[in-house]
Structures are given as C-alpha cells and as structure tokens.
Amino acid sequence: MRVLLIGSGGREHALAWKLAQSPLMTEFYAAPGNPGIAEHATLAALDIDDHDAVVAFCKERAIDFVVVGPEAPLVAGIADKLRAEGIAVFGPSAAAAQLEGSKGFTKDICARYDIPTGAYQRFNNAPKAKAYVRAQGAPIVVKADGLAAGKGVTVAMTIDEALAAIDDCFEGAFGEAGAEVVIEAYLDGEEASFFCLCDGKHALALATAQDHKRVGDGDTGPNTGGMGAYSPAPVMTPDMVDRTMKDIIEPTMRGMAESGHPFSGVFFAGLMITAKGPELIEYNVRFGDPECQVLMMRLKSDLLPLLLACANGTLDQVNAEWSDDAALTVVMASKGYPGSYAKNTPISALPADADEAKVFHAGTALKDGALIATGGRVLAITATGKTVSEAQKRAYALAGQVRWENGFYRSDIGWRAVEREA
C-alpha cells in the first residue's frame, strides 16, 4: 500500500514509526512531517490546510490510504474531501469531528443519549455566563467551545478565576474558539484517557493511558497540551473499561449514527473516574499527544490493518494485541512553555533508540543540517518496562542524555502509578 500521513508532531512521529513496520507498506509519505518522521517516511512539503493540494498529491502518487494525525484538518473537513475523491482515509467527517470541534455539541449529545458527564450550560455572552458561575459557585470548569490547542479549559477553584476565564474567552484569548463558552460542573476523581477505534457501526477498545496536563511537578501550574503520559492507567480496571464502552462509547456511536454523522476514526475519551464510575470530560477525535507515543510502544499488532478497518467498515474482523509491559513518555519542552519561549534553539545531542526506548520528535526542524527546537513541546522521550516504575527510570535516564540547554521537563511523570506500585 501507498500511504500518506498528515501531521508533524510527536503523535505523528509515533504513528509513522509504527506504520512503517507494516509489511503491507510499499511507499510511505508524510506531510509536512518532521526530522524524526523523516527516518520512516518521505517528507512532502504540502500545505495540509490546502485540501485541494492534498488531493492532487494523492492522485499524483496513487496514494491508497491517508492517515490524518491532528484534529484541525479533520474539523476543517479534510476527510470529507478525500472520501469525495474516492481516497480511503482514517479520520472522521467534519460533522462527526464536531465531537472535538465543539464542546457544546458533545455535551448536547451526552444530554440526548444519557451519557454520564458533568452538568453544563452553554453561553454566547459574558454577563449571563458570569451570573451562572456566581449562582453555581466554585470549583467550576470554564471551556472555550472550539479548538484551542489544549489550552481553552480552566478548572477554576475560585469564582474570580472562573470570571477571569470567561473574560479571556470572550475577549479573544482563544480566537474564534472562545466565541461561545461551556460552563460545567467540577468532577472530582482521577483522570484517565481511553482510546477506541470505530468504523461507524463497530467499536474496538484499544488501551488506556493517563497524561499529565499541568506544567509543573506535583500537577501544579498552568495547563499544557500534555507534559507526559503512561500506559496502562491502573485506575482503568477491566470493569471500568466495560462500563466506559457500555455507558459512554456505545451510546455515542449510536447517537452519532442516528444524528446522520456516523463516526469513523478514533474516539479519545477524556474520563474522570468518580465515585459514580466513569464520566466523560471531553472527546477528542484523534490520538492523544503524548498518549499516542505510549500506546504505539505497547501495541504488538500491525497498526495499518486496524486503521484501514475503520475506513472500510470491517472493524469487527480485526483485533489489537498489546504488550503487558508499561510504557511512559516524558515531554521535553522549551523553557517558558506554555507561555512565550525562544524558538530555533539548538539541540546538540539525542540518545540512541533501543528496543525498549525511543525519542519521538514533536517540535523540531533541521537548519543547516543541525537539529533545532521550533515548538513548545519538542521531544517525547519514551520507554517501556515491566512496571511503570521501571519505564519511568528508563525514560528519565534517557532524558538526562539529551543535550539541549533551553529544554526542561517534569521530574514526576507517572507518580500516581509509581505510588500504587510502591
């Protein structure tokens, strides 16, 4: 098969690394890719926002299958464009991608199909939103409705913090994403990430993970796109997985089909495990970043037929096999992230990959043959082990070998699981 992968982050490097191992692969392209992805695929300098250019490239190279990594092109309808041209694609339609593109849309689906989630209200102006917050009290959660690159959510512990978050949204801190806000009840419990493939009619549970959103040790400081993750998440027991499938995934799949937007792709359910059981915080319609890195390290099956089965509606005919080992990834970010940071800083050395360890590139580029950091989250240093503790030791040993003066990372990724193991 001739395959094109869309995207350039750490998630896409992990997908590229895994896809490249498939015996079905004959030609492999990535657009726009990054220096890490270039080890596995031929990079194509395509503007992925120009859907006509992507289609033209696919026709020119006789691409059989397109795998879309990030959410923005999906929300913008790239999968619809490709399907209309007869090109198989992994990823939902624009209508189905609203599950990530609009938090209000997802909440309405939950209300309609009795999917457990926090109580909520939607607002298109600040005074009404603020009146609701004052009536409800804190803690409370304020979310920009649209795509805000993982930064449009404020878990406000005080009313003042919630009011400031509302102002941020309506005053343009998140651009168009903040034109509407969703205000929802604070859920108390332990967060987990659950991944599940879907072809519109069938669902295949993948693995679980837990990520670390806050920038600082001990889960302190502002939210980020994710500072590290590990898999599996101990809180997701077999019973909890069954309940998630029955109470959250299956009604969503049914609801989307009944609404005329059957979902094909990956459900990434952000869950809060409360005293009542699993409750939905939010949906993403692509693999998580950095969760994808730990999932791909644990996946024993060939990834390509699994993704193809989503596109072909044959997901009931495939299975995914997982390693019993744990995997853990530590994100190395530019100093200052998630605020402003220096760009194009030099990375002078990276550790060599091994069977149980891999450095995934997230925000890197080559300049005059030298590796530089171009993003906020730059590297995802990933390792496996018999336990989370063992994977953690390996990942941090590798992180210590990176030579990049402008980089920093949290020192406690996996702390909940490590405490449990101890």
Image (spheres, rainbow, N blue to C red):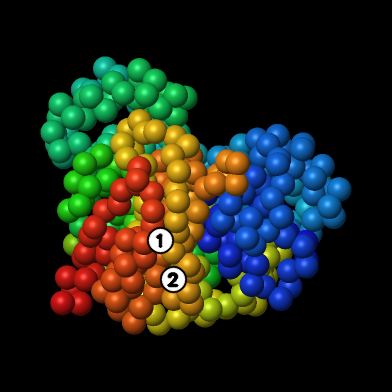
Left or right of residue 331: residue 59: right
**Secondary structure beneath label 1:** strand
Q: Residues within 10 Å of mark 2 (few under 14, many from 20)?
A: many
Q: Is residue 184 above or below residue 252?
A: above
How far across and down, in percent of the image, does residue 115 sit?
A: 38, 54
Residue drawn 39% across and 74% down?
384
CA separation, marks 2 and 1?
Answer: 8 Å
Of pointers 2 and 1, the one earlier in the residue sequence: 2
Q: Residue at x 60, y 41 (%)?
A: 368
Check disc 1: other Cα within 10 Å, few if <14, some if 14-19, many if 20+. Answer: many
Disc 1 marks a residue whose amino acid type is: Ile
The reply to whether residue 75 is visible in this rendering is: yes
Residue placed under numbered mark 2 in the picture: 357
Horizontal and vertical percent position of residue 256: 55, 51
Q: Quadrant of residue 391?
A: bottom left
User: Is 99 or 284 nearer to us in this picture?
Assistant: 284
Determine the residue positioned at 60% across, 46% down. 369
Q: Residue at x 31, y 36 (%)?
A: 336
Looking at the image, residue 224 sits to the left or right of residue 132; the answer is: right
Q: Quadrant of residue 314?
A: bottom right
| Quadrant of residue 224 within the rendered picture | top left
Circles 2, 1 touching at the beta carbon (< 8 Å): yes
Q: Position of residue 350 (x, y in %)?
A: 45, 59
What residue sits right under mark 1 in the picture?
381
